[in-house]
Image: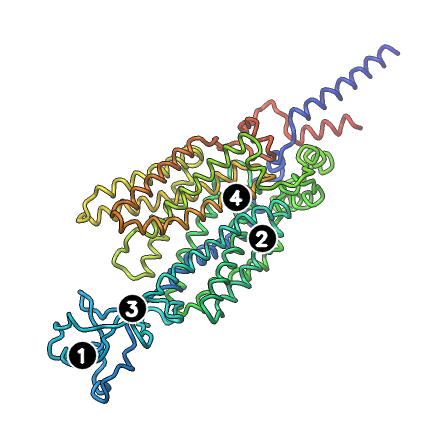
Amino acid sequence: MLMVFDELLIWQIWVRVELNERVKENKMTFENILEEIGGFGPFQIAVVVLLSVPRMVLPCHFLLNNFIAASPPHHCDISTLGGGGLFRNLTREQRLTVGLPVREDGAPKSCEMFTEPQFQLLANSSDAGNLSTVQCRSGWVYDNSTFTSTIATEWDLVCDRKSLTQTTSSIFFIGVMIGSITFGFLCDKYGRKNTLLASYVMSILFSFASAFANSYIVFAVLRFLTGFGLTGILVNVVVIGIEWVDTRHRACIGVVGGLSWSVGNMLLAGLAYLINDWRTLTMVVTAPLGFAVLTWWWIPESARWLLAHGKVEKAQFYLDKCAMFNKRPKVSSNVLLETLSDTEKQDKSYTYLHLIKTPKMRRLTLLTGIVWFGVALTYYAISLNIGGFGLNIYLTHFIYAAIEVPGKLVIYFCLDIFGRKKCQAGTLLLTGISIVVNIFIPRDLWHVRVVVAVLGKGLSESAFTTVFLYTTELYPTVVRQNGMGYSNFMSRLGVAVAPLVLLLVDVWSVLPQIIICTVAIGSGLAALLLPETLNVRLPETIEDVEKTRGKEVSSPSAESPADILELKSTTDM
């Protein structure tokens, strides 16, 4: 009897030791949790829908300068020009003839006027070559048929001050650059949800304030702060969406988010067409953020971030809510969350320095920076360099936005077939090739050049869609927002450089295209050096990046998380 009891005791000890080994070998990761509670169900769909509204606001502000800073046709105000009663008795057309010099196409010059009325031009308007002119002395008269009011017409940002209209765009993106770094740090330290609310509030306050600016300087400062605030939205909506879905549906979430951008971009064209006053347009495109603030209460905090920072109870709350929405059983809380907390809890704060402290992280940071810079410069340079279709500004903007939709849909299917790395490299390399091809196409074949240019635009958009998803999958949870902040900084640096590259057309007509295609091909080759993330679980810690991550391939013999917990609970009884 004693021998039987001893054998039973030995067997129980062996079972406990074997169980501990099996639990250790089958370490519970967040991917396992999502598998239990549903990695892509009603809960995730609701999150994506709620985050789509603020994401549609982003392109409305990023490209808002195309409309609020537009410079309509204008000429000098000649109402005060001398000439006595004779000049005042002339018709409008006659006043323009005797008061303004004309360009080669016959239209009045925008920035010059005659020193005094030239009445002889009423008889012979072609004899105006040697007449003295001066810069506009009494302001300008604007054509309000397209725009009722823009910042250019309100503060006379024309002629020698016309560069200030583009300066506002640069100032806005400088705010975005600084916001990328700042919010990347804040999001990893204080969580995604809290910083998202702060971004909503900042964006609303500064954007509405800019609509009431009474001077150019005040407007420029408020646009800088608006760009700073909007960056928090840009960084957070991408990461929250990705961190709540399973591996198989990450590409879907990334592309849906990209489609939200395209929809917002197309809506901007329609809103700008209906609203011709820049102040009203600024407030209207910002208004949806009010709805975003109201729905913020239903946005979940990233459970990955909570677990990585040891906030087990809060993580349990959101995980239970996810399971309830998806109509899946709740995961056993105590054992599961204790296991995750022990393996993923971090007692230290992470900064941008952790992006370069270890060998593979340094390599990852360098390569992603090159790719983001190349993607952004290529996309915006092509967008700014493609000529219109001979249509009005609203329809042209709408077509450019609509072209992005097919690019996003095609890349959605390619991401899961060819993988992230091949798609990222392929879209950039093909973009560069399309630019090279356009260099050698004669300008007389304008229709062929337009087709190739549009193809390049679609490919560059596909590259942008891919890089958001790809980068999110490459960086570990503990520094993911820092990584996204750094990447967005490199992206905005590319955006700032793109207009400067296009100015080189005065040096050599094809120099901008050579630089753009070189950057596109170079960043595409850099993408080939990055690791593949297709069907690979998201890294949680820096150690996960430093060691090779395996693909998530389920095995019939492998225990499910529920089986492991059930077995452990049985042996503990």
Q: Are marks 3 and 2 in contact (CB under 8 Å)?
A: no
Amino acid type of the residue that numbered disc 3 sits on in the rendered structure: Pro
Number of the label disc, if any, that sits on residue 196: 2
Mark sitting earlier along the chain (4/3): 3
Q: Which residue is tagged 4? A: 484
Q: Going by the image, does 550 lie left or right of 74?
A: right
Number of the label disc, if any, that sits on residue 73: 3
Q: Going by the image, does 382 lie left or right of 36?
A: left
Mark sitting earlier along the chain (2/1): 1
Mark sitting earlier along the chain (3/2): 3
Dot 1: element: loop
The residue located at (43%, 33%) in the rendering is 421
Q: Is residue 257 placed above or below 168 in the rendered structure? A: above
**x and y percentages locating residue 240 in the rendered image:** 56, 46
Q: Which residue is tagged 1? A: 118
Residues at marks 2 and 1, CA–CA distance in whole angstroms: 62 Å
Residues at marks 4 and 3, CA–CA distance in whole angstroms: 41 Å
Amino acid type of the residue that numbered disc 4 sits on in the rendered structure: Met
